[in-house]
Amino acid sequence: MSEPRYTNRGFGLKQVIGGHVERDYASPLVDRMRAEGFALRAGELTFRLAQEFGFCYGVDRAIEYAYETREKFPGRRLFITGEIIHNPRVNGRLTEMGIRFLEGPEGCGYSDLAADDVVLLPAFGVPVETMGRLRTLGCLVVDTTCGSVLNVWKNVERYAKEGFTSLIHGKWDHEETKATASRALLHPGGAYIVVRDLDEAKAVAAHIEHGGDGAALAARFAKAASPGFDPDRDLGRLGCANQTTMLSSESLAVAETVRAAMVRRFGADEAAARFRAFDTICSATQERQDALHALLDAHRLDLLLVIGGYNSSNTTHLLEIGLDKGVPTFHVQDAAGLLDLERVRHQPLHAREPVDSRGWLRAGPMSIGVTAGASTPNGEIETVIRRVAALRGVPIA
């Protein structure tokens, strides 16, 4: 029997690779905090951990599949299309395991792939064109796409099939959104437009309600819309979807802004037939946002540290929540960003690059909140906590 060329179920080697995953990413300190009320006291410092943080099911699954694949094919060339998740430590570990990246700054490209090669798809999924290319090459494909992402794809494909343009709340250059948008083109006449925030949604809503310069709107969204997008034609029937890691409250506001414009333009009855929306924020993203809100409501914090890759969308939205609550909040990639008692390297909200700031860690008693994006290992959370304690000169057993 010939070898299957596609799997999305792993290889049944979880018990074999479990110890390796645990060694690479687990944290006894974080486990202890979880067992002791999500708090840790060290001298004058009190660390408070949000009750949902770090790796989600989809990330756990993607990492396990990568480790299983390496175990299953020790003698085969193993590639991954791009970052498996947005965490430098995890992606660096895959490189150490001999898994090569096809895309990105260090990518080796697709031209050298052969039918005997094994290619992993990341948790974000890949565009339809990439999947077609891999099928043509005949590689063995191991698909780690998250189930929450697949749910969004189903909605977008249904919209396209039924003649609705997909309005996607997300970042047009994010891997997940690129993969999602490609599903809107699977049916003839399919179209999409990606809005990053409420301001962009309002621009779309204004055109729906009042019309105007369609060419200018199309030019504004040139990188964020389907080829040949025509606002006067393609905004008449809309189905909303989300990049799964966006801020939930903003996604709801985007949908309501566009729906209300439809009502004002067409009336309630006709708008109901022209507009659809499904909440496709993933449960893990929502749980981490809710847990941070609960932490901030329950405790007065002097400082909040949000830990995760700088290109992690769900981590960035945790930063946004902390800042909205008025708490001094810093998005740090890892413990290396805690430079000394005075300086912290962090990425501000909406920035593209990290910066160094001063005065982040004051003297005296402090209550420090800690949370992490869904792609952050527990071990990285521990190293951040231990680094803060070391800077203040207090021991952690």
Image: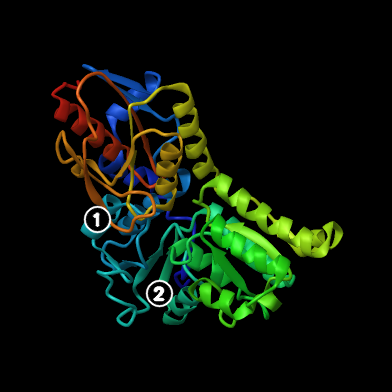
Horizontally, is 26 left or right of 216 in the view? left
Of labels 1 and 2, the one closer to you: 1
Residue 111 locus on image (x, y percent): 32, 82
The residue at the point 23 percent across, 36 percent down is: 383
Q: In whole angstroms, how far apart are the C-alphas of marks 1 and 2? A: 23 Å
Q: Is residue 280 visible?
A: no
Number of labels in the image equals 2
- Residue that mark 1 sits on: 92
The residue at the point 61 percent across, 58 percent down is: 241
Does residue 139 lie above or below 29 as drawn?
below
Classify residue 257 by image quadrant: bottom right
Residue 300 locus on image (x, y percent): 40, 22
**Residue at the limit of the structure toward the right, as seen here:** 269
Q: Is residue 23 visible?
A: yes
Classify residue 306 by image quadrant: top left
Classify residue 258 by image quadrant: bottom right
Residue 208 locus on image (x, y percent): 70, 67
State yes or no: discs 1 and 2 in contact (Cβ < 8 Å): no
Does residue 10 lie above or below 173 as drawn?
above
Does residue 36 lie above or below 221 as drawn?
above
- Residue that mark 2 sits on: 139
Horizontally, is 157 left or right of 389 in the view? right
Q: Dot 2, crowdedness within 10 Å: few (<14), some or many (≥20)?
A: many
Q: Secondary structure at mark 2?
A: loop
Residue 255 locus on image (x, y percent): 65, 54
Q: Quadrant of the C terminus?
A: top left
Q: Secondary structure at mark 1?
A: helix
Q: Amino acid at mark 1?
A: Gly
